[in-house]
């Protein structure tokens, strides 16, 4: 029986899946002895991901060294990330849906180098902070289907989606995709809201949307709304609210938490 003296919004299924994956890894590696059992290590990893517990706090709580906590957390994240669905697998699932929702989200990060302007690639002018850009696909109910590798936060959503091959893949598969205006020009499968018409040459003002166009936009917003749930699910894990790891570790964290969310 594994006990952690704090409440966590994590199901037993998540703990069991990570424990089994760690046991399998230990068996493959031929590990004969560890300070913590696979179940205890899984509990430690989940406490870090879900509660954002620091390494020193976990070291004291589990009776191991800070270095051991670091190694255990890194190993647990890597084991989970290896189970994350690929884009092809996500598209196979998406084909069975009436439509999917595509959205981008910024995950704040503070471990970026400030010297020689190295932080500029991670600075989002829209959100006025440093972060990483993650593209998210959700089903019509807002359940997370896929989360992309993390890119520097200065990347525009459309540019990031194209870099991941997401726009071409969705169009090639003919999967109806509901998205916001950031994905304008994404192709026939990408449905975006009606934009204001061009300037009226006579008045110099933008022409207003017609009543029919407004109704279309309202219906579109209703379909797109549940997609925010997937972003909220990611950020409900405190380690993603402010990533304090190296930017190169952000993708692994996102993939690991995707697996835990989908495990439910």
Image (cartoon, rainbow, N blue to C red):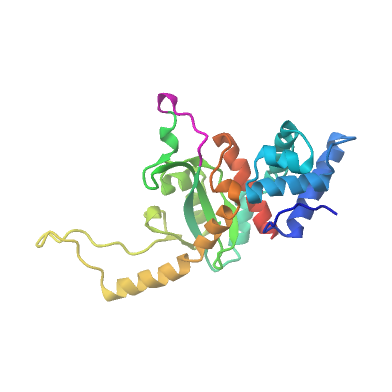
Residue found at x 65% / y 51%: 50
- Does the magenta-highlighted stretch encompass residue 112? yes
Q: Residue at x 71, y 54 (%)?
A: 6
Tell me the quarter of the image containing the C terminus: bottom right
Residue farthest left in this picture: 202
* Magenta segment: 109-117
The image quarter containing residue 205 is bottom left
- Residue 150 visible in this rendered orientation of the protein: yes
Q: Position of residue 229 (x, y in %)?
A: 53, 62
Residue 136 sits above or below residue 155 on the image: below
Write the residue at 60% across / 37% down. Answer: 249
Is 59 placed left or right of 247 in the picture? right
Q: In which quarter of the image is residue 220?
A: bottom left
Q: Return the x and y of residue 238 as percentages of the image width and height.
A: 59, 50
> In the rendered view of the protein, which quadrant contains the N terminus?
bottom right
Compared with residue 32, is residue 263 higher up or lower down, i.e. above or below?
below
| Left-right relation of 185 to 139 | left
Residue extending farthest right: 32
Question: Closer to the camera, 72 or 217?
Answer: 72
Asked whether residue 85 is in view, the answer is: no
Residue at figure coordinates x 75%, y 43% from the top left: 61
Q: Position of residue 17 (x, y in %)?
A: 77, 53
Tell which of 54 and 177 is nearer to you: 54
Q: In this view, does 153 lie above or below 182?
A: above
């Amino acid at each position: 029986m594994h006990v952690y003296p704090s409440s966590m919004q994590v199901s037993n299924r998540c703990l069991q899946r990570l424990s089994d994956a760690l046991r399998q890894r230990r068996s493959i590696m031929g590990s004969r002895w560890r300070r913590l059992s696979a179940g205890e290590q899984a509990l430690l990893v989940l406490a870090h991901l879900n509660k954002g517990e620091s390494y020193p706090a976990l070291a004291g709580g589990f009776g191991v060294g800070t270095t051991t906590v670091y190694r255990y957390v890194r190993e647990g994240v890597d084991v989970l990330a290896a189970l994350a669905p690929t884009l092809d697998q996500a598209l196979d699932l998406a084909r069975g849906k009436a439509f999917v929702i595509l959205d981008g989200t910024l995950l704040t990060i503070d471990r970026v180098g400030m010297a020689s302007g190295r932080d500029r690639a991670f600075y989002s002018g829209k959100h006025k902070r440093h972060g990483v850009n993650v593209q998210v696909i959700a089903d019509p109910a807002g359940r997370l289907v896929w989360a992309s590798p993390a890119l520097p936060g200065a990347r525009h959503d459309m540019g990031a989606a194209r870099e991941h091959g997401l726009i071409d893949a969705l169009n090639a598969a003919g999967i109806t995709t509901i998205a916001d205006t950031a994905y304008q020009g994404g192709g026939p499968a990408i449905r975006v809201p009606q934009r204001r018409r061009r300037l009226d040459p006579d008045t110099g003002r933008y022409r207003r949307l017609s009543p029919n166009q407004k109704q279309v936009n309202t219906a579109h917003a209703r379909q797109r709304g549940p997609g925010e749930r997937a972003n909220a699910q990611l950020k409900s894990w405190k380690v993603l609210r402010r990533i304090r790891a190296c930017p190169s570790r952000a993708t692994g964290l996102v993939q690991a938490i995707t697996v835990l969310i989908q495990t439910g």
